[in-house]
Image: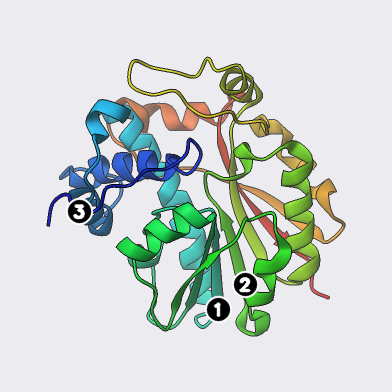
């Protein structure tokens, strides 16, 4: 079924293809750090010059796999505590997490801009437990679609860096206020990376990354608690495993302040 879909996306929605491609590259490896057959299937179905546009670097694929695995662990832990809970994936593009860690009972809500949501709907059609909503993550309208009765976990993977800092803080604060006892998992890029993206200097021979106005160094994660008084827990989620040099360097990378990070937030009970 190769090449049945020919997507045309703007710069930020196109990042969904970038992350999908690198996850699939990693998943194809026999020693990959992420098992993601759905990503491989999607790449085979999409008519797009992935390698020419995004490159085929092993390092990038492994790092994307490790990042996705951080989110997967948090979601799996949540579903172990709240097996009928709701996982809200904000700006998730073609993320296939719901096929990697689903427990058969949870509810999933994908929230994305209309063009990205339309592509997801064609490639990953919704069903009775997996819904798709055409809505900006910064528009509180999506919150009306979430039933918090059995627990809520919100993920923002590859999202906040594309928002302006006040928007990112407002989104965290709105989630903390609206979903008492809930949780959120997000990732950030360091400030130097954000600056280069905004300046249009985050480029390789294949790809120019879109602007990323929101940057935060790893040692600044405590500042996320100031987004709202209900943010009562701020915890970094460190990558585990890896192979080769990456595996050897991961313990030392934790000491580097100016690096990407995955952060889990907990919200106070009402």
Badge 2 marks a residue whose secondary structure is strand
x, y (%) of residue 68?
A: 42, 49
Give the answer, above or below, for where 52 lies relative to 1: above
Relative to 108, 245 lies left or right: left
Crowd band around label 3 with a 10 angstrom C-alpha radius: few (<14), some (14–19), many (20+):
some
Indicate the quadrant containing the N terminus: top left, top right, bottom left or bottom right.
bottom left
Numbered circle sitting on residue 45: 3
The residue at 42%/43% (across/down) is 9
Q: Determine if residue 57 is in view.
A: no
- Residue 12 relative to residue 154: left or right: left
User: Taking the image as drawn, is residue 14 in sight?
Assistant: yes
Q: In this picture, is 7 found above or below 229? A: above
**Residue 197 versus residue 189 in the image, above or below:** above
Label 1, label 3: how many angstroms apart (C-alpha)? Answer: 31 Å
Of the image marks 1 and 3, the number of the one nearer the N terminus: 3
Q: Which residue position holds label 2?
A: 152
Q: Nearer the viewer, residue 70 or 109?
A: 109
Front label number (3 vs 2):
3
Asked where in the image residue 135 lies, by quadrant, the reply is bottom right
- Cα gap from disc 3 to disc 2, whole angstroms: 32 Å
Q: Position of residue 256 (x, y in %)?
A: 58, 24
Which numbered disc, 2 or 1, marks the residue that appears first in the sequence?
1
**For mark 1, what is the residue?**
85
Furthest-left residue in this view = 1
Q: Residue at x 44, y 40 (%)?
A: 15
């Amino acid at each position: 079924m190769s090449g049945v879909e020919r997507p045309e996306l703007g710069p930020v929605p196109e990042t969904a293809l970038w992350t999908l491609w690198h996850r699939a590259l990693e998943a194809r490896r026999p020693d990959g750090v992420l098992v993601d057959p759905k990503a491989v299937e999607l790449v085979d179905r999409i008519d797009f010059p992935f390698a020419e546009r995004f490159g085929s670097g092993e390092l990038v694929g492994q790092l994307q796999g490790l990042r996705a695995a951080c989110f997967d662990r948090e979601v799996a832990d949540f579903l172990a505590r709240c097996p009928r809970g709701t996982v809200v994936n904000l700006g998730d593009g073609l993320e296939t997490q719901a096929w990697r860690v689903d427990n058969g009972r949870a509810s999933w809500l994908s929230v994305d801009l209309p063009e990205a949501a339309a592509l997801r709907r064609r490639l990953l059609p919704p069903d009775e437990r997996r819904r798709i909503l055409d809505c900006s993550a910064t528009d509180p309208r999506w919150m009306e679609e979430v039933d918090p009765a059995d627990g809520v976990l919100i993920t923002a993977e590859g999202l906040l860096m594309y928002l302006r800092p006040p928007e990112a803080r407002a989104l965290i604060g709105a989630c903390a206020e609206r979903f008492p006892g809930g949780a959120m998992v997000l990732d950030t890029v360091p400030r130097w990376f954000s600056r280069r993206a905004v300046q249009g200097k985050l480029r390789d021979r294949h790809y120019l990354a879109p602007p990323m106005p929101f940057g935060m160094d790893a040692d600044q994660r405590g500042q996320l608690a100031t987004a709202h008084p209900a943010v009562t827990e701020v915890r970094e989620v460190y990558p585990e495993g890896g192979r080769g040099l990456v595996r050897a360097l991961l313990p030392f990378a934790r000491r580097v302040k100016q690096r990407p990070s995955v952060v889990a937030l907990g919200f106070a009970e009402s």
